[in-house]
Image: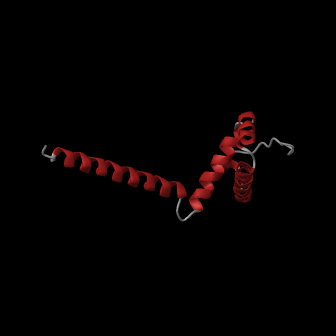
Amino acid sequence: SNKPQMKVSLPKPSKMSTLQKAFLERLTSSRFRELNEDLYTKPSQDSFQQFTERPELFDQYHVGFRKQAKEWPVNPVDVIYKKIVSTWKKEVQGKKKQSKQRENVVV
């Protein structure tokens, strides 16, 4: 990436003023949006290389994701998980029913 990189040293959150904490929250959200946009608009190989070369981006992305997800009325990951589990349970029940039907068949 041609974006300038800057290392920033932040005080521990417990030593930050309320204003500093508010700014850090906004920066965390902005960084997540920036990384998220990169992931959606760049080829996967470019993103993989970027995150491999700079592993701290993984943590930055996920800290922002968790913060963002807390604000959603429904987390889409939970919806997808419930759908997968529901579908799996239906398949298992269907197979059990088919198995019992085969047991009851008289030849």
- The single residue placed furthest to the bottom in the displayed view is 73
Quadrant of the image containing the C terminus: top left
- Left or right of 23? Residue 92 is left
Q: Quadrant of residue 59?
A: top right
Residue closer to the observer: 23 or 3: 3
The quarter of the image holding the N terminus is: top right
| Quadrant hosting residue 48 | top right
Q: Is residue 14 visible?
A: no
Q: Is residue 103 left or right of residue 83?
A: left
Report the residue that reaches farthest toward the front. 107
Q: Based on the displayed image, in which of its 4 quarters is residue 3 positioned?
A: top right
Residue 41 shows in this picture = yes
Q: Position of residue 90 (x, y in %)?
A: 34, 53
Q: Residue at x 62, y 57 (%)?
A: 68
Q: Residue at x 12, y 45 (%)?
A: 106
The colour style of the image is secondary structure
User: Which residue sits furthest left?
Assistant: 106
Name the residue rendered at 75%, 40% in the picture.
Answer: 46
Q: How far across and how far down the image is residue 95, in percent? A: 29, 47
